[in-house]
């Protein structure tokens, strides 16, 4: 399913909206504002979305991410190492502790809606920023957890370019779950950190 959605986003569909021309960071900021405004609950925007350069927050501090070490959920192979130079980050925050959503009841259905929002951010980025090779979206904590997962997608996850907003909750979960990871930071001798991504859960 994800391949089909990515294929659509990369050129077969995707709706009439488009950001204005500009460098990738400017385009990402427009994507963040546009996508965030479309996801609401009880008439209120679910989360704020901040686009930024590759950074991870740990212990209240922000660290520049230089590499990503990825352990696939379905593989026992060693972690794959990727350069973060052409990576776009987004952070979703609901205004509560640990960026949890500050209003309403924290349900699985609502978290799936946030998953779908994260997917749309990634798809729009690949569609409108050809130089971006990977996207990390830091999600708010789901019910029962203190820290949320990270969605990590690479352009190469698509073989070819739906609208994520048309996905039902179960379909969104199926498309996103294989690309959700727990994350941690590990310092590098040359400065900055490696973002360590491990199977979610």
Image: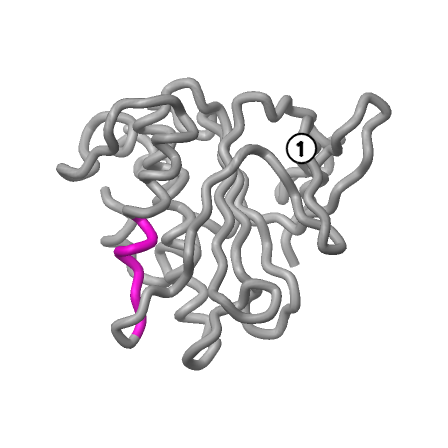
Q: Against 66, is 46 above or below?
A: below
Outermost residue, top side: 131
Q: Would you name the residue on which mark 1 appears?
A: 65
Magenta span contains residue 163: no
Query: What residue sits 50% from the left and 29% below the top?
Result: 134
Outermost residue, left side: 16
Left or right: residue 78 compared with residue 28: right
Outermost residue, bottom side: 105
Query: Looking at the image, what colour scheme do you see?
Result: one colour
User: Along the line of sight, which residue is nearer the eye, 160 or 75?
Assistant: 160
Query: What residue sits 68% from the left and 27% below the top?
Result: 66
Q: Against 139, is 21 above or below?
A: above
Tag 1 secondary structure:
strand
Q: Where's the C terminus, which quadrant?
A: bottom right
User: Along the line of sight, which residue is nearer the eye, 9 or 19?
Assistant: 19
Outermost residue, right side: 189
Left or right: residue 165 compared with residue 98: left
Q: Where's the N terminus, which quadrant?
A: top left
Query: What residue sits 56% from the left and 49% below the top?
Result: 180
Query: What residue sits 46% from the left and 41% below the top?
Result: 51
Magenta span contains residue 39: yes
Query: Which image quarter: residue 112?
Result: bottom left
Q: Position of residue 3 (x, y in %)?
A: 37, 34
Query: Which image quarter: residue 144?
Result: bottom right
Q: Position of residue 110 (x, y in %)?
A: 40, 69
Q: Position of residue 50 (x, y in %)?
A: 46, 47
User: Along the line of sight, which residue is nearer the eye, 3 or 146?
Assistant: 146
Left or right: residue 112 compared with residue 187: left
Q: Tell me where the magenta segment starts and ends, as one range.
A: 35-41
Query: Which image quarter: residue 82?
Result: top right
């Amino acid at each position: 399913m994800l391949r089909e959605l990515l294929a659509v986003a990369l050129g077969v569909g995707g709706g009439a909206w488009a950001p204005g021309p500009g460098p990738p960071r400017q385009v990402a900021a427009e994507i963040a504002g546009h996508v965030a405004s479309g996801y609401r609950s009880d008439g209120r925007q679910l989360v704020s979305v901040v686009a930024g350069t590759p950074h991870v927050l740990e212990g209240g501090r922000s660290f520049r991410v230089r590499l990503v070490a990825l352990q696939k959920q379905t593989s026992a192979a060693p972690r794959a190492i990727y350069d973060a130079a052409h990576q776009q980050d987004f952070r979703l925050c609901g205004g509560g502790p640990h960026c949890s959503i500050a209003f309403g009841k924290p349900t699985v259905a609502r978290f799936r809606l946030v998953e779908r929002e994260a997917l749309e951010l990634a798809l729009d980025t690949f569609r409108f920023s050809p130089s971006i090779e990977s996207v990390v979206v830091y999600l708010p904590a789901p019910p029962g957890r203190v820290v949320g997962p990270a969605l990590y997608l690479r352009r190469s996850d698509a073989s070819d370019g739906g609208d994520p907003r048309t996905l039902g909750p179960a379909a969104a979960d199926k498309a996103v779950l294989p690309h959700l990871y727990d994350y941690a930071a590990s310092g590098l001798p040359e400065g900055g950190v490696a973002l360590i991504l491990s199977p979610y859960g």
